[in-house]
């Protein structure tokens, strides 16, 4: 059975930054840090995707957080409505 090693966020950031520098090949980084090249690519991609947030204005970050919370509350509302409908349908079928 494969045993997965958990890496700290700082380790992942360090490896991803090394990959972004492109001073070493993926094979070299993989060998040096004992991590699969595909995993390094995933960490590098995640770093690139999240980098924009570092420079985003606080109001923009707050706005996106509010949007996420609004979407989440709508989903909970929908789940509640569906549960009510399901309960009603179960009672109708039993009657």
Image: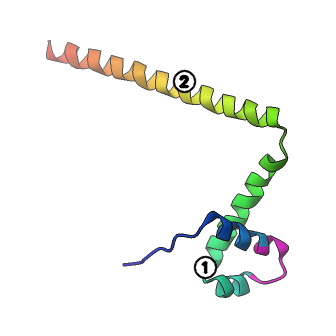
- Toward the left, the furthest residue is 95
Is residue 61 placed above or below 43 in the rendered structure? above
Q: Which corner quadrant of the image does residue 68 belong to?
A: top right
Residue in the image at 27% along x and 19% along y:
87
Q: In the rendered structure, which disc, 2 or 1, sits on the residue that comes first in sequence?
A: 1
**Is 37 or 56 nearer to us in this picture?**
56
- Mark 2 to mark 1 CA distance (whole Å): 40 Å
Q: Position of residue 91 (x, y in %)?
A: 21, 15
Q: From the image, which quarter does the N terminus lie in?
A: bottom left
Residue in the image at 78% along x and 70% along y:
17
Q: Where is residue 48 in the image (x, y as percent from the top left)?
A: 77, 58
Provide the residue span drawn in magenta.
Answer: 18-25
Q: Position of residue 55 (x, y in %)?
A: 85, 47
Crowdedness near tag 2: few (<14), some (14–19) or many (≥20) residues, C-alpha within 10 Å: few
Q: From the image, which quarter does the C terminus lie in?
A: top left
Crowdedness near tag 1: few (<14), some (14–19) or many (≥20) residues, C-alpha within 10 Å: some
- Residue identifier under label 2: 74
> Label 1 near label 2: C-beta < 8 Å?
no
Q: Could you tell whether 59 is left or right of 75 in the image?
A: right
Q: Is mark 1 on a helix, strand or loop?
A: loop
Is residue 34 placed above or below 17 in the rendered structure? below
Is residue 94 placed above or below 33 in the rendered structure? above
Q: Could you tell whether 4 is left or right of 94 in the image?
A: right
- Residue identifier under label 1: 35
Residue in the image at 78% along x and 75% along y:
18
Indicate yes or no whether the magenta region holds residue 21. Answer: yes
Residue in the image at 80% along x and 83% along y:
24
**Is 76 or 66 nearer to us in this picture?**
66
Q: Is mark 2 on a helix, strand or loop?
A: helix
Q: Could you tell whether 26 is left or right of 81 in the image?
A: right
Q: Where is residue 83 in the image (x, y as percent from the top left)?
A: 35, 23
């Amino acid at each position: 059975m494969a045993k997965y090693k958990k890496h700290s966020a700082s380790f992942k950031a360090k490896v991803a930054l090394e990959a972004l520098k492109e001073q070493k090949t993926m094979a070299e980084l993989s060998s040096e840090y004992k991590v699969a090249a595909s995993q390094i690519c995933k960490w590098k991609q995640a770093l690139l995707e999240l980098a924009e947030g570092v420079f985003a204005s606080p109001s923009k970050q707050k706005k996106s957080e509010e949007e996420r919370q609004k979407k989440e509350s709508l989903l909970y509302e929908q789940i509640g409505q569906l549960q009510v409908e399901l309960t009603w349908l179960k009672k109708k079928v039993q009657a």
